[in-house]
Image (cartoon, helix red, strand yellow):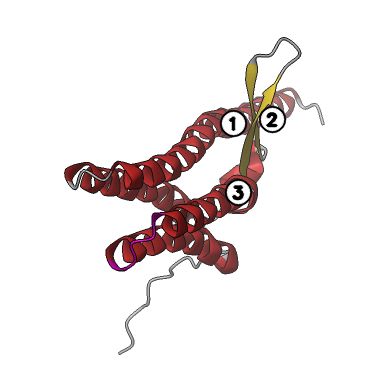
Amino acid sequence: MDRPQAVTENYANPVTCLFHVLFKAGALVFYILFSLFVKSFVIIFVITVFLAALDFWVVKNVSGRILVGMRWWNEIDDEGNSVWKFECLDGEALARMNKKDSWLFWWTLYLTAAAWIILGIFSLIRLEADYLLVVGVCLTLSLANIVGFTRCNKDAKKNIRGYFEGHAQNAITSRITSTLQSAFGVI
C-alpha cells in the first residue's frame, strides 16, 4: 500500500532565498576564515564590510520586498528630523505570501545578528579591538534591517487584521441582508 505523502510547501522564490542566505553567509564565512588564517586586518575589514553592506542592501531592497512583501527606508524631513517610512503589500496579498519564504527571511535575519554578537564576544575575549570594529559595523547593518522590518511587520499585521475584519464584516452584512430579504420576500 502506498502511504499518503504529506503535501509540503516549496519556496516560491528559490533564487531570492538563495541570495538572501548567500550574502549573509558570505560575510560571516569570509570574516571567520580570514580571521583565522590571514592576518591582514585591512583586507578583512574592507571585504567583510563590503559583503555585509551588499547583504544589507539586498535584504532591504530586494529580498524583503519579494519574500515578505515589505520595504522600509529612512528620510530626513525639512526640519532635519529622521522619519521612518514603511511600505507593505495590502492585507490580501500579505495573507498569500509563501510561509517558507517568510520563515527563511525572518530566521536568517535574526540568526545573522546572533552570529555577529557571538563573534563580537570572541573578539572581546581575545582582546582584538580592531576585529570588534568589523563586527560592530556588520552587527549595526544587521540590526538596522531587523529594526526596519520589525516596525514594518507591525504595520503589515495591522493591514492583515483590517483585511480580515473587513471581509468578516462584509460577510455578516451580506448574510443579514439576504436573510432579511428572504424573510420579507424582497428580491
Is 85 one of the magenta-colored residues? Answer: no
Q: Residue 69's mark?
A: none
Disc 3 marks a residue whose amino acid type is Trp
- x 46%, y 59%: residue: 43
Disc 1 marks a residue whose amino acid type is Ala
Instruction: Give the foreground label among 3 and 2.
Output: 3
Specify the principal SS of the magenta part. loop
Residue, disc 2: 174
Mark 3 falls on what kind of element? helix
Residue, disc 1: 168
| The N terminus lies in quadrant | bottom left
- x 60%, y 53%: residue: 58
Name the N-terminal-most of marks 3 and 2. Answer: 3
Q: Residue 57's mark?
A: 3
Q: Position of residue 32 (x, y in %)?
A: 32, 61
Q: Quadrant of residue 87?
A: top right
